[in-house]
Image (tube, rainbow, N blue to C red):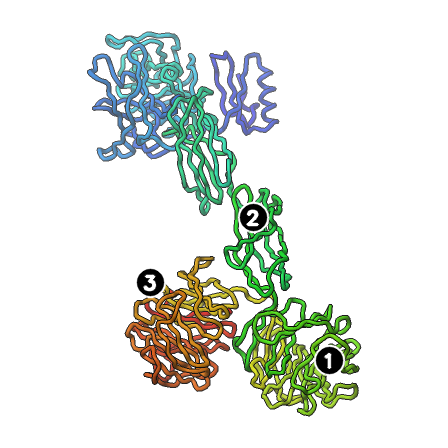
Amino acid sequence: MVRTGRLSSGVMRTGLSPVQNAIVVQLSAHADRTETAAVIRLAHSVKVDVEVRRVNPERLRFDTDSCDVENRVCDLPLRGGTYINSGGTYCSTAFRALGNNGRRYVLTAGHCIKEPSDPSPRWFWDTYDSIYSADHIHSIGVAEQWHYPGNDWAKIDATGQWPDTASWPAQVAFWGHGSGYPWPQSLNYPIYGEEQAFVGQMACHAGANTGGTCATVQKTEDETVEYGNDYLHDLMALRGKNLCIWGGDSGGPVYTASANMALGIISGGGDWAECYEAGKGDPEALFANIQEATAELGVKIAPLTALASQTTLNISRPSEHVVRASGTVKHDSVPIQANQVTVNFYRNENGQWALRNSVQAPVNNGSYQAPDVSISEGSWRITTTFPGNDMFSASDSNTITITPPTVETKPASGIQENQATLNGTVNPNGKETTYRFEYGKTTSYGNSIPVTNAGAGAGTSAVNVYLTPNTLLPRTRYHFRLLATNQDGTSYGSDLAFTTGVKWSVRNSNSSGSAQANFWFGLPGETRVAGDWDGNGVDTPGVYNPSTGVWKLRNSNTTGAAFTTFQFGGGPWTKPVVGDWNADGTDTIGVYDPTAGNWNLRDTNSAGNPTYSFQYGGGVWETPVAGDWNRIAGDTIGVYDREAGNWNLKNCLCAGNPDYSFQYGGGPWSGAVAGDWNADGTDTIGVYDPTAGNWNLRNTNNGGNPDYSFQYGGSQYQFTVGDWDGNGTDTPALSWANAPTAIEYQLRNANTSGNPEINFESGGPEEEPLAGDWNADGITTTGRYELLPGIWRLRLNNAVGIFPVTEFQYGGSQFKPVVGDWNGDKTETVGLYEPIEGRWELRDENSAGNPQLKFQYGGSQYKPVVGDWNGDGKDTVGLYEPQSGQWILRNTNSAGNPDLSFQYGGSQYKPVVGDWNGDGKDTVGLYEPISGQWVLRNTNSSGPPDLSFSYGGSQFKPVVGDWNGDKIDTIGLVTW
């Protein structure tokens, strides 16, 4: 009837449908428009009815799986045509089916459950997996409903039993017995639904006894058959030479292989045990109509794909981080009557969906609403599961992504005396977002800006945000952080801090190393100067604003306000100079116009007319200097050409030719300084490389090699020099606005070179870093001591973040803090050392109060040290004299002579103490800050180091503790 050569390549199968009285052409759903149009034109050209159906090509797919063909058993999934048993009676499975109540069923014949002569039903059914042995038996389920006699069908409830797999499609094991069948053996043959059988239709059955055979449907009328005294109605019949059916095949499936559809359930054969024999008629198999069976049993043959449309799932967001699931559960648009559904919450973790919560929701007339559930940040998938039946599961169509804003606090900028700009970035992550800054003197903050949150939009990239509180206190340390909120939550940036004003770091020697004094004075944009403003022999800080000509001078090297403020200069007078112009012992101010080379100098630190006014320099000579070059008549002037490194110095405050002219510096040495580097009363020159922070100083005013060469500073600093301690020697100072505002700890668990195992920030630059075992747990943690008010702040962990501290007042700026276990109770507590008198004041508790121990031992030339020198469990005092490297240690906390005295070290070292080998005794060590070299000894005596390694450098201070509780003290570094 149809010539294959003219058919499209998209045709998959043709057949006859007596029900529609038409030829059926099954066309691949993947066929293109041209192929489809060709088939339709061909269908219209013939004189019989042709029905064109588009089908999924997967419906013809044949699969094989692990089965024992001889015994008709298989591994999961459970298939039709396999062996099932109950109390010695065996039958075959027909189809897996889904109940209108959402439960999972296996269909079989009704007489397998109970015949009239049976004393009771066969309730419990089992089967084997692919290994046919007693230890591989599995429960299928319990018979729930059956009809026999009259009809012949039954359902077994498999919900929660061995065959209850994640999906529940109907499948048949076609064992491939018989001959003449055009399809190959398939042990996992898909079934896509139910249909009415028709005469002439090719159909197959599968059974636990005979395997699988195929024949044509011969009868579809309401045939009544008598089995003994039992009558069955409405049976259909397969008949053909290839057919074979025997006992044990009862309950097996009848299906059409051409359309993958269920037709019926085997009831029996014409004379029950029947296969083809020559001289007899064709064998016959009788089967019940599948559509009548499923209608009465309240089930539906489950298709290969889940019935996702049967369950709906709606997600709402009633509040931040909260989701609410609701929906319906229906079967063929009929509400399911059931107790409850399960709502599952899966979170995406490393690319895998991990179940993180489940809640039960009652079902009322097919509708449900689950309790509200809080979910954390991340991507979530939510499913609703009908108990025991994933066929009724539905997932939210979109992954729910909980994404609060991404927030980063950035360093403050534009720091002034009473204001600063707080900076940060906010990524709204696609949701409307607001933000604000919190700030205050502690990490409790207490203030926020703006009062009403500002908007950051709903974009998907970071935006810069900044706000400027303008009511800050001068020279005050502030903490601040950025926070932002969207519908998914609030995110907090890290805590940062700043101090209003500029930090100065002063050294008392012309060498590399840490600052001897740190304080805050001035503002960004101001030029830093130093001078002896009150004639007491000590230089103190000052600042000059080149735009306004305003000077601010302070009489001590501490944080505080200016003692005098006045205006002198500004405009073209952009360079400040300082000197003792009249040799009265007091430094006063001056200004220099680098373009014209004009000088205006005053003999008092106040506004007014210049005392001295003249021209000298200008052009390439853009850098002014001042000094007493000849020890005769006070300070006079000089100029420096920073490109060529040429100096012109004069011995008077006047125009004219230079008295000293030479080359020294230039190139990277763009900074010029003058000072009395060796305390001989004569000022000489020096140069500074601001990129590398290198200094080269000379003791004579001429060219040559430097007398002092060291590193101190870098590109972020302004530099100046002064006699900070009144000893007659000028030494360097650095100042910068964006100074580090937190102490950073870098701790190691081994006394070797390497990277830190522990790294965190705690405290600020006005605090002295400490370490101690404050709670007797065997682990050293950090602390801080704020000198001016004598405030101690002790932490109980070495973790990143902001944590509560034990805070109390004990001491003041005249004391050096010390820490030790003074009474042997394994808790380290606080103490003070007053270096002028050598007085020790020790407490047995970490709290305010009077000292339990008070005595004199030492003096200003010593550095205090503490350790358990004799292993008795108590820490006692000691001293280190840095010039000679002498250690003098006592075994009691009292005045007296040293119990141990030896030499180890020198002025280039910082003393450290620890139990380096875990023997219960503390011994000495040294840290050399220029190279970061540690040299540690295991005995309190002179000699070579037992441990020597490099860790750190000039920007660090050493710290020691048992950071991991292994009874061995190891090293650490602090940036400060």
The answer to whether residue 215 of the structure is visible from this angle is no
Q: Secondary structure at mark 3?
A: loop
Q: Do the residues bearing badges 3 and 2 touch, measured as CB atoms within 8 Å?
A: no
Q: Earlier in the sequence, mark 3 or mark 1?
A: 1
What whole-number distance in Å separates the C-alpha atoms at marks 3 and 2? Answer: 38 Å
The disc label shown at residue 484, or none: 2
Label whose residue precedes the other's in the sequence (3 or 2): 2
Q: Pointers 2 and 1 in contact (CB under 8 A)?
A: no
Above or below residue 97? Residue 459 is: below
Q: Position of residue 395 (x, y in %)?
A: 47, 33
Query: Image quadrant of residue 72?
Result: top left
- Looking at the rendered structure, the secondary structure element under dot 2 is strand
Residue closest to the eye, 557 or 701: 557
Q: Position of residue 125 (x, y in %)?
A: 26, 25
| Count of labels in the image | 3
As shown in the figure, which amino acid type bears the numbered disc 2? Ala
Please tell me whether mark 1 sits on a helix, a strand or a loop: loop
| Residue named by callout 1 | 602
Cα distance between the residues tagged 2 and 1: 54 Å
Q: Residue at x 46, y 36 (%)?
A: 382
Type of amino acid under label 1: Arg
Q: Look at 34% across and 66% down and name the residue there.
A: 827
Q: Which residue is mark 3?
A: 777
